[in-house]
Image (cartoon, rainbow, N blue to C red):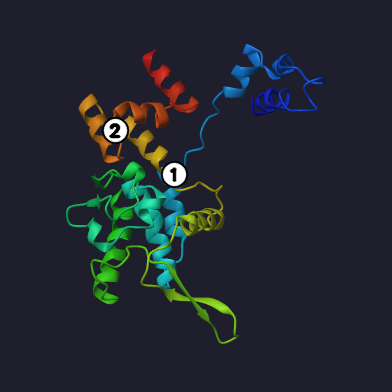
Amino acid sequence: MALKRFFVWLAGQPGYKSRISYSDADYFNLSTKEARIAKATRPARVPTLEQIWHVIQSMPATTDIERRNRALIAFTILTGARDGAVASFKLRHVDIARGQINQDAREVQTKFSKSFVTTFFPVGDRIRAVVADWVTYLRTEKLWGLDDPLFPATKVAVGDNLRFASVGLDRRHWSDAGPIRSIFKEAFVAAGLAYFNPHSFRKTLVDLGGKRCRTPEEYKAWAQNLGHEDVLTTFRSYGTVSDHRQTEIMQKFS
């Protein structure tokens, strides 16, 4: 389509009018069959909860940076928050006791600037404990306040070898979600798995909701917990049934 638009434009330019006609652009039209092939959807790669837990438990947690990275991945599957929001959360937005996060668009980089409250998804006490331990560590040992970042940027300084190196946590937010995606990639590769980006965790939670929810009201609540005002958004964008799951469901009918 881009080539077609270019040749339509070119056919009207001086020096080309006598060589190219507007009808020549029709050469780039696809047949119905070709268009269907081009637009065909491919099965999305979605990590399982078992794979995610394998990554979390295989990550080291000795230094402050290692503990942050480990909690970061646990938090993403626990809340389903987008990576942009994760980079901007403050400690005030997390309520471990109630099991909730407040995605306040005035301070959190949410999609379409929507504000909503997310309750922790039922992904296991072990994952929840990793996040709770991280918040407790920041509050009681690091003595950070409510306005400090939940996942602070890495502090870089000149080391003994006169080269820049990571020296701990900086008391500021990441400027974007790029470092988060890098942490995910390194963690999955180190665990011997293919890389799954942060957004794929939302698809994992949608799959889990499809198995756990038994009524339309339950699925509506699950969708709202992901930040979807319209449950159809969850169905259209995330709710495609995988080939494997489709086979399981159809076999149950017989």
Q: What is the residue that sits farthest to the right in this orientation?
A: 19
Image quadrant occupied by the C terminus: top left
Residue 21 or 214: which is nearer the viewer? 21
Judging by the rendered image, the residue that carries numbered circle 1 is: 199
Residue 207 rendering spot, x and y as whole percentages: 38, 34
Given the image, on which type of amino acid does mark 2 rest? Arg
Residue 139 % position (x, y):
25, 71
Q: Nearer the viewer, residue 35 or 17?
A: 17
- Disc 1 is placed on an element classified as loop
Residue shown at 43% from the left, 61% from the top: 175
Whether residues under marks 2 and 1 lie with C-beta atoms below 8 angstroms apart, the answer is no
Picture quadrant where residue 154 is located: bottom left
C-alpha distance separating marks 2 and 1:
21 Å
Q: Quadrant of residue 122?
A: top left
What residue did someone put label 2 on?
212
Element marked by disc 2: helix
Residue appearing at x 23%, y 66% in the figure: 146
Q: Position of residue 74 (x, y in %)?
A: 37, 54
Residue mark closest to the camera, 2 vs 1: 1
Q: Which mark is residue 240?
A: none
Question: What amino acid type is highlighted by mark number 1?
Answer: His
Left/right of residue 188 with respect to residue 4 in the rendered view:
left
Q: Quadrant of the N terminus?
A: top right
Question: Where is 181 relative to 153, above or below?
Answer: above
Pointer 2 or 1: first along the chain = 1
Residue 24 at least partly seen: yes
